[in-house]
C-alpha cells in the first residue's frame, strides 16, 4: 500500500510539475517531502485507505507466530517485506524466521505486539501454570540487551492459565484470558472456563509493568476468551470469543467496550465463529467461521459495527483455515491453513485471492500457529 500510495503521489506531483514548471528548489523540497512521507508511513502512521489518519502506529515488519519446530512450542519471528513475503536482505536476526524463545524447553505461545512494536507479549508454560511474559525490543528491531531481564514475567497468574495477551492501541492496557480452576477435576485444565482480564500498563524497559489486574467478565460457567482490541483508539471495543461453557461445541464473536462492559453485544453467532481480527480502520472484522461450510472453518470478512452479509476471504470445503491476523498498516491477512493436523501460515490480500505460503520448507513438518502481525 505504501508503494502504491507513493506511486500515485509521485504521479500527481509530476503532473503538477508539468503544469506549474516548478523550480529545481521545488523538486528538492518534493524529495524531502517524499522522504518524510515514506518514513512516516513506515514507522508511525497507519493510513492505508487515505482520508483521516488512523491512530495506529505499528510498522508490520515482523509476523510473530508459535511453532513446535524444535519439539516444544516457541515464539518465532518472520521478518517480512511490504508484500508479506520473507525478507531476504537487511535481516535483523541471524535467521529468518528466528526462534526467539529457543532457550525455554517448555511451551511459549500466542504472541502479540505492542502498538509501537517494542514489546511482544506471549504466554509461557511452567508446569501447569501459564503466565504472560514480554520480550522488549530496541528501535532497530533487535532484542534490547540493555535491560536487566529480557524476557520478563509481566503478570503473576497465581496458578491459572493466562493466554492470548494483547494490547490496547494506545498501549495503556493489556488484555488477555485467564482459565482458573472452576470445575472438576481439581486443577486447571480445559474443562475449566475462562474470563477476560485487563491490567494497566505503565513504564518502559526495566520499569514496564502491568498493574491493577482485574476481571471484566466474571461468570464462572461461561467461557470468554481471545480478546482483540480495536486498533483505532477512538473505537474502544474488544472483539472476543464466547461459548456457553468450556466444553460447548459452539462459539460466537462478541464485542464490548472493555472499560464499560454493559456495552456487550453478540456480533456474529451463526455456526462456530471466533478468533476475530480488526481491519486497521475498524470498518471490518475478519474471523474464522464454519457457517454453511460443512464443518470446516473458513476466513470471512464482515462490516463493523453491523456485520451484515459476510464475505468469504479464504474458503475450502476440505481443509480448515483459521486464526487470521491483519497487517496493521496495509491490506494483507495472514492465517493458518490445516492441510494436515499441523498448521501452516499463508498470506492473502484482505479482499481475497490466492494465498501464498509464508514459511520455508524446514517448517513443513511443524505445527505453526497464531500469526500476529
Ligand atoms: Ca519453548
Ligand atoms: Ca478444574
Ligand atoms: Ca467466564
Ligand atoms: Ca454460534
Image (tube, grey):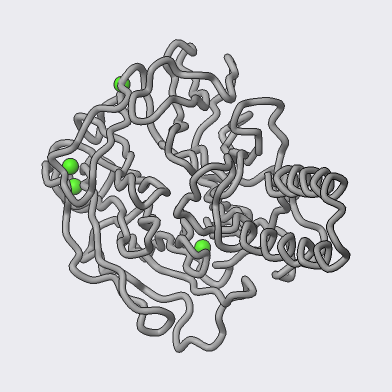
Asked if residue 85 shows in the view, the reply is no
Q: Quadrant of ligand 4?
A: top left
**Residue at the (70%, 69%) spot, across then down:** 93
Q: Is residue 246 above or below residue 370?
A: above
Q: Is residue 123 above or below residue 253?
A: below
Measuring from the top left, give residue 270's x and y in whole percent. Answer: 34, 17
- Which corner quadrant of the image does residue 132 belong to? bottom left
Quadrant into which the N terminus falls: top right
**Residue at the (69%, 49%) spot, across then down:** 2
Measuring from the top left, give residue 312's x and y in whole percent. Answer: 54, 20
Measuring from the top left, give residue 103's x and y in whole percent. Answer: 55, 72
Depth check: give the residue in front, 50 or 354: 50
Count of numbered circles in the view? 0
Measuring from the top left, give residue 198's x and y in whole percent. Answer: 24, 57
Depth check: give the residue in front, 312 or 69: 312
Q: Is residue 331 above or below residue 209?
A: above
- Which corner quadrant of the image does residue 315 belong to? top right
Asked if residue 262 shows in the view, the reply is yes
**Residue at the (62%, 62%) spot, across then down:** 40
Left or right, 247 with respect to 299, comes to left
Left or right, 155 with respect to 295, comes to left
Depth check: give the residue in front, 367 or 224: 224
Depth check: give the residue in front, 85 or 2: 2
**Residue at the (32%, 31%) spot, across then down:** 253
Amino acid at each position: 500500500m505504501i508503494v502504491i500510495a507513493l506511486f500515485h503521489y509521485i504521479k500527481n506531483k509530476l503532473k503538477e510539475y508539468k503544469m506549474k514548471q516548478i523550480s529545481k528548489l521545488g523538486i528538492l523540497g518534493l524529495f524531502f517531502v517524499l522522504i518524510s512521507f515514506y518514513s512516516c508511513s513506515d514507522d508511525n502512521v497507519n493510513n492505508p485507505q487515505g482520508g483521516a489518519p488512523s491512530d495506529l502506529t505499528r510498522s508490520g515488519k515482523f509476523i510473530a507466530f508459535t511453532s513446535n519446530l524444535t519439539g516444544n512450542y516457541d515464539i518465532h519471528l518472520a521478518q517480512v517485506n511490504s508484500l508479506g513475503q520473507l525478507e531476504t536482505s537487511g535481516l535483523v536476526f541471524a535467521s529468518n524466521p528466528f526462534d526467539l524463545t529457543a532457550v525455554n524447553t517448555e511451551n511459549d505461545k500466542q504472541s502479540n505486539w505492542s502498538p509501537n512494536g517494542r514489546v511482544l507479549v506471549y504466554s509461557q508454560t511452567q508446569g501447569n501454570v501459564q503466565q504472560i511474559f514480554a520480550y522488549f525490543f530496541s528501535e532497530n528491531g533487535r532484542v534490547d540487551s540493555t535491560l536487566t531481564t529480557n524476557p520478563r514475567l509481566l503478570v503473576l497468574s497465581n496458578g491459572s492459565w493466562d493466554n492470548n495477551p494483547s494490547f490496547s492501541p494506545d498501549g495503556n492496557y493489556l488484555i488477555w484470558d485467564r482459565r482458573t480452576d472452576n470445575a472438576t477435576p481439581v486443577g486447571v485444565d480445559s474443562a475449566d472456563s475462562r474470563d477476560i482480564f485487563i491490567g494497566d500498563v505503565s513504564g518502559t524497559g526495566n520499569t514496564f509493568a502491568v498493574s491493577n489486574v482485574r476481571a471484566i467478565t466474571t461468570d464462572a460457567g461461561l467461557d470468554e476468551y481471545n480478546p482483540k482490541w480495536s486498533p483505532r483508539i477512538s473505537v474502544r471495543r474488544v472483539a472476543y470469543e464466547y461459548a456457553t461453557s468450556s466444553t460447548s461445541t459452539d462459539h460466537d464473536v462478541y464485542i464490548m467496550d472493555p472499560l464499560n462492559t454493559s456495552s456487550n453485544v453478540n456480533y456474529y453467532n451463526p455456526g462456530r465463529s471466533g478468533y476475530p481480527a480488526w481491519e486497521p480502520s475498524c470498518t471490518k472484522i475478519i474471523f474464522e467461521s464454519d457457517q454453511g461450510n460443512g464443518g470446516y472453518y473458513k476466513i470471512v470478512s464482515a462490516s463493523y459495527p453491523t456485520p451484515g452479509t459476510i464475505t468469504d476471504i479464504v474458503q475450502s470445503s476440505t481443509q480448515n483455515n483459521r486464526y487470521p491476523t491483519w497487517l496493521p498498516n496495509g491490506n494483507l491477512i495472514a492465517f493458518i491453513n490445516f492441510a494436515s493436523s499441523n498448521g501452516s501460515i499463508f498470506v492473502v490480500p484482505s479482499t481475497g485471492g490466492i494465498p501464498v505460503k509464508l514459511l520455508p520448507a524446514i517448517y513443513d513438518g511443524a505445527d505453526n500457529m497464531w500469526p500476529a502481525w
